[in-house]
C-alpha cells in the first residue's frame, strides 16, 4: 500500500535565500505491524501501516472495533513496541515510554482522595518540579480548561463534564507536543459531548499541538479533524486518508448543515460500511 501522509498547516515561508532544514513529522509509522498471542494462538492487530502525522495537525482515527486504532495510539505513547516496522517520533525511533505526549483515555482516572489541583499536578510532582512553579502551571491550565475556582474540589464534587476537563488539564499541564486521545468523550451525553468538542477545538486553536484522536463517531471525526484516517480490520490496516476541507475556526452546529459536510460524511460512511460488511462476511 502506498504511504499516506497526514499533513498539518503549511510552514511559514522563509525569506528568499534562506536555507530551511526539512522538519521531521511528529510521527512516522513505517511498515508497522503488531501481533498478539492468546490462548487461541496469534492474531494480527495491525498490518503494514505506513502513515505520517505532521506537527500541529489534528488527526482522527476511525474504524470498526478491534481494527487497531488504540493499538497504534499505544505505540505512539511508547507503551507497545511494533512486532515489525518502526515508529518514529520527531525523526527518532521510539524505543521507550514517550514523555513528549499526553495520553487522555475514555476513563478520567482521577484519584478520589486528591483535589482537582493535586490531580492535575501529579505528573509535575513525579518530575520533581518545584512547588511554586508547579502551582503556577497547574493554575494556568485549570483556567485554560474553564475550571478556575474549582482547584480545591475533589472529583466527587465535580460534574461529569468538569471531570473530563480535569482529565484534559492533566494531559496539558506538562506542555507535551502531542495529545493522544482515546475516545475521551465517548461516554458523554450528546449535549456535553458537543460542549467538550468545542472546548477542545478552542484549546487546540490556541496552541496548535498535534492531536491524534480515536473515535467511533464519524460526525466527531469530521467536525474536529484536519484529516481522517480510516482503518479497516482483520487485520487492522489504514484503508484511506481523507482531507477535511472545512474552514477553521469551525461553528460545529453550522457545519452539519453544509453540503461539503454531507458529501464528506457520505463518502467516509461508505468506507466504514464496507469495512463492517467485510467483518460480517469473514
Image (cartoon, helix red, strand yellow):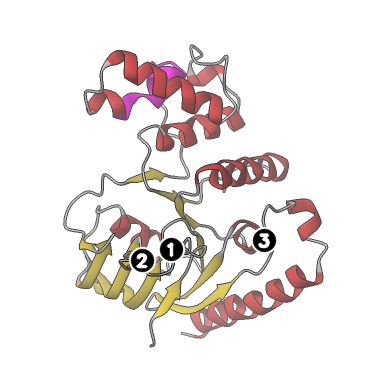
Tell me if 85 is positioned left or right of 148 in this view.
left
Q: Position of residue 190 (x, y in %)?
A: 70, 45
Tell me if 251 is positioned left or right of 31 in this view.
right
Mark 1 or 3: the one toward you: 1
Q: Secondary structure at mark 2?
A: loop
Q: Quadrant of the N terminus?
A: bottom left
Look at the numbered discs 1 and 2 and tell me whether their residues touch, using CB distance below 8 Å: yes
Q: Considering depth in this image, is 180 or 17 the residue closer to the camera?
A: 17
Q: Considering depth in this image, is 15 or 273 the residue closer to the camera?
A: 15
Look at the numbered discs 1 and 3 and tell me whether their residues touch, using CB distance below 8 Å: no
Q: Position of residue 15 (x, y in %)?
A: 44, 63
Q: Is residue 275 visible?
A: yes
The alpha-carbon separation of the residues under discs 1 and 2 comes to 6 Å
Q: Residue at x 34, y 20 (%)?
A: 134
Q: Is residue 152 magenta?
A: no
Which residue is the site of mark 1? 14
Q: Considering depth in this image, is 43 or 129 the residue closer to the camera?
A: 129
Amino acid at each position: 500500500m502506498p504511504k499516506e501522509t497526514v499533513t498539518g498547516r503549511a510552514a511559514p515561508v522563509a525569506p528568499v535565500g534562506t536555507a530551511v532544514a526539512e522538519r521531521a513529522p511528529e510521527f512516522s509509522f513505517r511498515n508497522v505491524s503488531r501481533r498478539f498471542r492468546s490462548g487461541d494462538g496469534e492474531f494480527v492487530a495491525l498490518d503494514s501501516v505506513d502513515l505520517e502525522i505532521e506537527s500541529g495537525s489534528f488527526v482522527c482515527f476511525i474504524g470498526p472495533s478491534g481494527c487497531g486504532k488504540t493499538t497504534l495510539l499505544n505505540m505512539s505513547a511508547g507503551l507497545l513496541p511494533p512486532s515489525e516496522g518502526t515508529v518514529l517520533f520527531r525523526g527518532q525511533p521510539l524505543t521507550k515510554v514517550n514523555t513528549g505526549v499526553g495520553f487522555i483515555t475514555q476513563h478520567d482516572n482521577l484519584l478520589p482522595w486528591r483535589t482537582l489541583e493535586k490531580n492535575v499536578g501529579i505528573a509535575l510532582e513525579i518530575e520533581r518540579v518545584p512547588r511554586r512553579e508547579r502551582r503556577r502551571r497547574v493554575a494556568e491550565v485549570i483556567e485554560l480548561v474553564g475550571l478556575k475556582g474549582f482547584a480545591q474540589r475533589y472529583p466527587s464534587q465535580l460534574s461529569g463534564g468538569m471531570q473530563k476537563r480535569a482529565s484534559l488539564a492533566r494531559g496539558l499541564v506538562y506542555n507535551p507536543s502531542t495529545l493522544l486521545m482515546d475516545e475521551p468523550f465517548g461516554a458523554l451525553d450528546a449535549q456535553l459531548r458537543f460542549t467538550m468538542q468545542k472546548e477542545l477545538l478552542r484549546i487546540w486553536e490556541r496552541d496548535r499541538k498535534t492531536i491524534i484522536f480515536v473515535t467511533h463517531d464519524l460526525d466527531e471525526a469530521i467536525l474536529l479533524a484536519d484529516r481522517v484516517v480510516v482503518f479497516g480490520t482483520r487485520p487492522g490496516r489504514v484503508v484511506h486518508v481523507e482531507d477535511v476541507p472545512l474552514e477553521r475556526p469551525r461553528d460545529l452546529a453550522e457545519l452539519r448543515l453544509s453540503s461539503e459536510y454531507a458529501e464528506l460524511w457520505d463518502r467516509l460512511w461508505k468506507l466504514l460500511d464496507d469495512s463492517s460488511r467485510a467483518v460480517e462476511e469473514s
